[in-house]
Amino acid sequence: MDIMDEIRDLSRKYPDRRGALLPALYVVQKEAGWLSQEALDTVSRALNLPQATVKGVATFYAMYKHRPMGRHLIQLCTNVACMIMGAERLVDLISGRYGLEPGGTTDDGRFSLVIMECIGACDRAPAMLVDTDFHADLTADNIFEILEKYE
Amino acid sequence: MIKVTIDGRDVELEHPVTVLEAARKAGIEIPTLCYFEGLSPFGGCRLCLVEVEKLPKLQTSCTLMTADGMVVRTETEQIRAARRSMLEFLLINHPLDCPYCDKAGECELQDLVARYGPEAGRFAEGKRRHPESFDDPIIVRNMERCVLCTRCIRMCSELQASYSISVTGRGSHSFVEPFSGGRYDCEYCGNCLTVCPVGAIMSRLHRHSYRPWFVEKETETVCGFCGVGCSMVLQMRENSIIRAIPRRGVGFNEGLLCARGRFGYEYVEGGEELTTPLMRVDGELRQVSWEEALSFTARRLGEIRDEFGGGAVGAVASGRCTNEDNYMLQKLMRFVIGSNNIDSAARNYYAPAQIYLERIFGQGITANLIPGIANSDGVFVAGGDPTAINPILGLKIRAVWRSGGRVVVLGVPGGLKRFVPYELIPVPYSEEIVLSAIVGRLLERKPPGGANAALEAKLRDLRIPSDDELGSTGVSPEDVARVSEDLSSMSTPVVVIGPDMVQRRRASKSLFLLGAIAYLTNARIFLLADRPNYQGLLDMGCLPELLPGGRPVELEMFRHKAEEALGMKVPEQRGLNLFEMIDGAESGRLKALYVMGENPVFNLPDGVRVEKALGSLDLLVVQDVHLTETARLADVVLPATAWPEKEGTYTNLERRLQRVRKARRGKMASYGREDWRILADIAGRLGMTKTYQRVEDVWEEVMHVSALHTGLGYEEMDGGRALWPYYGEPLRGMEGDFTVEGLDGLPEVPAPERPYLMIERPLYHSGTFSRRSKALLAIQPGPYLKMNPELARRHGLTGGDKARISNGRGVLELEVRLDDDMPDNQVHVANTFEGFAAMRLAGFGTDPVTGALYMDDNTVRVEKVLR
């Protein structure tokens, strides 16, 4: 389905066009992994919302990305519980293995790493999201086993 | 009745208002930063905090509604401490670069810190850095200074309804930006400049050129660009305009201006103004003295009058000149030279439409108040984009939408696109059929009430198109049903008529149908006007058939009255209109033409023919500010003063009379003379005995001669109070008898192979004046050829290509600009830029009923220019 149609379909589930803005942004972000100006313009046209309004909303939320991301987005929590359980060591390991600093993207465009706020999985800390997959009870032993599955 | 106590003072309120408003009403000042009168309350700056008894915490008075028995204190030690803290927070990231900030001196943050402190901040970290943005030619953004009051954003979305900026990012990285992040893609109204309390959004036009306290003089005047007539204040230093600003409480525009009004004033200081009179000697225009030019002009006019009669002389009045200027031109023609050949570019659409509608409904039918539109529950627009032609009127239409009313546009909605529930775009020149169908449906829903017998008789003869006959228009019967349903559901509707409904064959029928819609729905009519004084020049008698006050010259009673008032004779027969004068020049019947503040060679269709016709005159006099295309053909060119150097009055499209005041004088002022003075001088040399010292003397005479303007002195015009019907007598009893062409038929919708050339009326330009404004040129530097992508594709074109349009009358080469909203089979070009007179390529004819110009034979060949 054409992306414009997909957004318009989606907007029917909401009482007004503005209500559909956040999900519509997810729809276009899914395409390229980030929101380019063109992507924001697509949403603006599909929902007939002002471009500036779309941009204002899109830049407010951390889950929308405004520069190109790797094919897979690693979002690792380093809040209190995860930190105590060794999340920071995992950041170092990832950096060491892939040359990937928090906020950065690997040269081959495979991974981007984002340090995220509490993921709500403190009982199974440390935890991370890779794209939309949830992974918990991470250790130095299993982290690469998981990540290597993402090409 | 609500009783509240504020600072020990009892305040009684009819309606619940906010505590802040109640306090202001009682004369108690509460400091604010994010509050701005007219915008929705935001409660973000926390400076308007007040103590309210029985409420545990301080409250923001801008959002708290009053309640009976409330006891409020606005200035206590606790409040002062809170305000000080709020300001300390705001200063954490503020650069404190007041020494070189243009806002210093009129900065609300600076004033508040001066009042409440703090003297020093406790925040030891560094300030956020964000480079000042110079991406835009007009507006410079300094987001380090921004206090995120969001006044600009609320202005842009609530009042301007342009939605061009928003807060991007979050927390201390929140910045106000347009979508691009750089240059604005907006309407450049500049109203964000008005509301910004700090130096975050500033104009580049006068950057670092002055301090607010350097303003030596302020002149309250009326904008010279369009027929709305917004009030503005010109701030002067050393007789140069520093800036043009609106002021809330001054004028009905309520502190709003558009791009042209706010930024376009500089055309008067471009350095291209004429400095001396010019006369053609040996085929070339040479500088001469005023005496030489005036005596030559008067002598030649006299000779031609004596040899060929007054009817051999004609004049073109100006929609940019004041009532006084136009009155004097009319007097020179009618009473001194003895010719009723006087007309203006209002002939293009405004004059014929106005006169025709008045013939149906009576004088003053279009004299309705612009602010009143916002109270209406529905608007029907046909014939042009009000947000471009008359921007501030357009804002009122957007306000109707905001308050839940319905906006229906026949044609491309342009700046109203976001505000229409559906689009209704007929094939070019089929609007008449669609309007007939709408009227047909309306007649079923709203049977006429019998008030206007002549109109109702015509309605009975009206041919209503069948559903099949609608086929050629591209508008479906369902659309027509929807429109008529919307129209009949409106209880206080407004009908807005633009130029494109008049500049066509059978203008009388389109106007009749629009009038019928207004009649059946009991709507008020607004006629768009792209010049500030079209209405005024009509009322001053700059029409071949009407004397001052709109009295027909051919009726002896009125002619006698005018003759008696002035002690001078007027010819009995109506004169030639603008196009008849062109014809007359061509055929040799017209020997002399006096053109004041108009550029017919550029602004009339078929420029080649117009140019040739003017070239064959014995005498062409042009009185203007600049050496226009027409002035270059003249035998005599007389330099006039521009709008900020004029004293006088304009009559806007509501028929409100407003004062235009002189701001520039002294050595910075141009070398021109006021139009009326030049004319009075020439009239004096031709035998007029009356002399005038001041512009007031001219107006005195207008009050004496025009039955409409009796007793309406300048002092009556302050504060926008000079509203129709003034104190005079509107002309009654002339209505009722009118003709409609083609009432019982339906036109064939033309289907030309080549696209139509239509004239774009851009928001950022106005005629040929604005091309001398650097600011407006920075926004829109040149012409372009607008078309939809499909049409472009068919001609092998894409955006940015150079295309050639041509027909038998000429050739233009322009850059292609694609626009998804353009209808098929037409291209649009603005008739503004030197060397790009689009009107030149259009043929024209004169409507036999209304006398309006219609564009004809205006198709063009479009081809790609190969590099």
Image: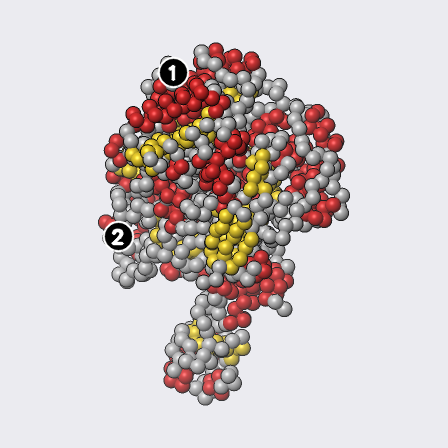
Q: Secondary structure at mark 1?
A: loop
User: Would residue B286 appear left or right of A33 to someone viewing this image?
Assistant: left
* Residue B687 disc label: 1
- Of the image marks 1 and 2, the number of the one nearer the N terminus: 2
| Residue situated in front as seen by the camera: B46 or B102 | B102
Q: Position of residue A1 (x, y in %)?
A: 63, 69
Q: Quadrant of residue B263?
A: top left
Q: Name the residue located 23 percent from the left edge and 49 percent from the top edge.
A: B99
Residue B461, x across and y down, in percent: 74, 32
Residue visible at 29% across and 60% down in the picture: B127
Look at the image and name its color scheme: secondary structure
Q: Nearer the viewer, residue B288 or B799?
A: B288
Say which of B583 and B506 sits in front.
B583
Res B856 seen here:
yes
Distance from the alpha carbon under mark 1 to that under mark 2? 65 Å
The C terminus of chain B, quarter of image: bottom left
Kind of residue indicated by mark 1: Gly
Q: Quadrant of residue B463?
A: top right
In the rendered image, residue B39, in percent from the top left (x then y), is placed at: 46, 43
Circle 2: is it few (<14), some (14-19), or many (20+) Cα within 10 Å?
few
Q: State the mark number for residue B97.
A: 2
Q: Name the quadrant containing residue B183.
A: bottom left
Helix or strand or loop: what does disc 2 sit on?
A: loop
Q: Going 39% across and 46% down the picture, which residue do you hit?
A: B776
Amino acid on which the number 2 mark rests in the picture: Asp
